[in-house]
Image: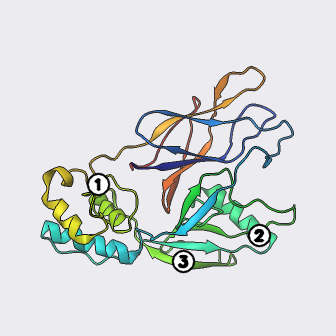
């Protein structure tokens, strides 16, 4: 089953004199889902009470690394009896390490531009416990923590903002969804492929055999959908659920995240299919 994570990051229009904490909710199917964000305390501050911390597990193989994507193209092309392309990085997965107020201002500017989706947790680790936050500052002076994101190759990143490249990655095109499915399987990631119980889909030989089976082959990229739904908040004064208007929503899977916005009815539609 595919899992798409939706994060309500920035509230642009909400009930007066209220605030909303950042939350992440899984959308497990193509059906409409209501994303529930509780109204925060009246002092306009997000508190840790009642919230849970995200817990990370083991480091996982990045299915979109150039090396893994090349393997996926090679395998797919072999099954299709075509020549495999040479994979070149389209993006870079990076770790930003702010250390002063100027760096934080640059991060705020990047976030406001909406081109990059910034995360305070590494994107190449298994999430063992979903939570409302990953880093909780110890005090008001504890401000400098790593930020993770993906930037396009050639992106004009602020020269004074320190970062390092974790990995060169390739973003599959919409027309390469079959290859992406192979890459996910090779990296032992979530997949809808129905592998034999005694075998694993990350075995290239198993994948090749599955391509020969018309029923299995149809699963490659054939069941993608565009997530959509509603975000609502509960008005604690009236007890009614009201639409979260013009909210900035970060939606994605793995290392790939994009922004979209709710409309005046609190409805959102993902910018791509998954």
Near mark 2 (Cα within 10 A), the count class, few <14, some 14-19 or many ≥20, is some
CA distance separating discs 2 and 3? 19 Å
140 left or right, relative to 6: right
Q: Residue at x 57, y 73 (%)?
A: 94
The quadrant in which residue 100 appears is bottom right
115 is higher (above) or lower (below) than 19:
below
Per the image, label 3 sits on a secondary structure element best described as: strand
Residue 101's mark? none
User: Disc 3 marks which residue?
Assistant: 166
Q: Which tag is nearer the camera, tag 1 or tag 2? A: 1
N-term mark: 1 or 2: 2
User: Disc 2 marks which residue?
Assistant: 144
N-term mark: 2 or 3: 2
Per the image, label 2 sits on a secondary structure element best described as: loop
Per the image, label 1 sits on a secondary structure element best described as: loop
Residue 193's mark? 1
Q: How has the structure been colored for display?
A: rainbow
N-term mark: 1 or 3: 3
Q: Are marks 1 and 3 in contact (CB under 8 Å)?
A: no
Q: Where is residue 238 in the image (x, y as percent from the top left)?
A: 74, 19
Q: Which tag is nearer the camera, tag 1 or tag 3? A: 1
CA distance separating discs 1 and 2? 42 Å
Q: Residue at x 66, y 63 (%)?
A: 120
Name the foreground residue: 210 vs 39: 210
Near mark 3 (Cα within 10 A), the count class, few <14, some 14-19 or many ≥20, is few
Q: Where is residue 174 in the image (x, y as percent from the top left)?
A: 33, 56
Q: Residue at x 35, y 55 (%)?
A: 191
Q: Do the residues labelled 1 and 2 touch (CB within 8 Å)?
A: no
């Amino acid at each position: 089953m595919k899992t798409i994570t939706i994060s309500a990051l920035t509230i642009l229009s909400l009930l007066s004199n209220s605030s909303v904490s950042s939350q992440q909710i899984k959308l497990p199917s193509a059906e409409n889902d209501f994303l529930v964000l509780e109204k925060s305390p009246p002092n306009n501050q997000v508190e840790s009470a009642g919230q849970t911390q995200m817990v990370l597990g083991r480091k996982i193989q990045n299915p979109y690394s150039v090396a893994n994507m090349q393997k996926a193209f090679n395998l797919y092309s072999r099954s299709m009896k075509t020549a495999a392309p040479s994979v070149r990085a389209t993006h870079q997965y990076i770790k930003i390490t702010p250390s002063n107020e100027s760096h934080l201002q640059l991060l705020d500017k990047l976030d406001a531009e909406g081109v990059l989706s910034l995360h305070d947790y590494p994107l190449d680790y298994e999430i063992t416990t979903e939570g409302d936050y990953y880093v909780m500052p110890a005090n008001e002076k504890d401000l400098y923590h790593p930020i993770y994101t993906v930037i396009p190759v050639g992106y004009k990143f602020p020269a004074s903002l320190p970062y390092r490249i974790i990995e060169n990655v390739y973003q599959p095109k919409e027309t390469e969804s079959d290859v992406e499915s192979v890459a996910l399987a090779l990296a032992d990631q979530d997949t809808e492929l129905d592998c034999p119980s005694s075998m694993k889909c990350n075995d290239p030989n198993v994948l090749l055999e599955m391509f020969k089976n018309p029923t299995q082959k149809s699963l490659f990229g054939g069941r993608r959908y565009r997530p959509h739904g509603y975000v609502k908040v509960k008005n604690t004064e009236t007890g009614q659920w009201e639409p979260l208007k013009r909210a900035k929503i970060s939606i994605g899977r793995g290392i790939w995240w994009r922004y979209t916005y709710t409309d005046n009815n609190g409805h959102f539609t993902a910018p791509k299919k998954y």
